[in-house]
Amino acid sequence: MIGWTYVAAQAVLLLALIFLPARDDWSTPSWLRTFGYLFVLAGLVIIAIASLRLGRSLTPTPVPTASGKLTTAGLYRFVRHPIYTGVLAVVLGLVVRSGSWIHFVIGVGTALFFNDKAKWEEQQLAERYPDYADYAAATPRFVPFAPPRKTG
């Protein structure tokens, strides 16, 4: 049930970012709008690649499947949650191009939400996969090449 609650909350945050109208709270030069669109595109590509790498282990909720296996190859070599990294890149792109303080606040809230969701998911992964603690100790959560942080 908690997994589906995370999915529902995630949907509300992302839909708000997508469908709330842009505003003119700050000037967004064309180069910055382009940067925003590139981040959205890059994020979508990361999500697709990471999802394909999971194969049968992919699930809509942050609960590992009974038949899944721990994935540490591909983008998972660089970060523990590349799908979330992709989503956060999309969020950054949407916020940058929006020109809106409302989008900014929702974007920050979304980043905090995904950090909390990742922590909860990592508890599930540690219970399911004995090697997860070693993987987490050596691999950053969202940002490649950042120092890994403790799970939980």
Image (cartoon, rainbow, N blue to C red):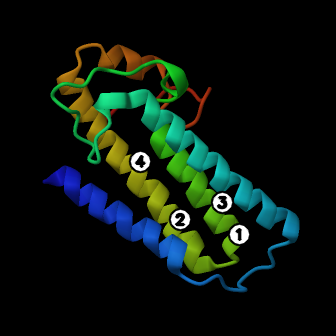
Label 1 neighbourhood size at 10 Å, few (<14), some (14-19), many (20+)? many
Q: Determine which of the numbered discs, if any, sits on residue 31 in the image.
A: none
Task: Report which residue position mark 3 lands on.
Answer: 93
- Other residues around mark 3 within 10 Å, as few (<14) / some (14–19) / many (≥20): many
Q: Which of 114 and 16 is in front in this view?
A: 16
Say which amino acid is labelled 2. Answer: Gly
Label 4 sits on residue = 115
User: Horizontally, is 72 left or right of 126 in the view?
Assistant: right
Q: Residue 150 at x, y = what percent?
A: 39, 28
- The quarter in which the C terminus is drawn is top left
Q: 101 or 75, which lies in front? A: 75
Closer to the camera, 139 or 9?
Answer: 9
Q: State which mark lies toward you, 3 or 2.
A: 3
Q: Which of marks 2 and 4 is nearer the N terminus?
A: 2
Q: What element carries label 2?
A: helix
Mark 1, residue position: 97
Separation of residues labelled 3 and 1 (CA atoms)? 6 Å
Residue drawn at the location 26% of the way across and 47% of the way down: 61
Q: Earlier in the sequence, mark 1 or mark 2?
A: 1
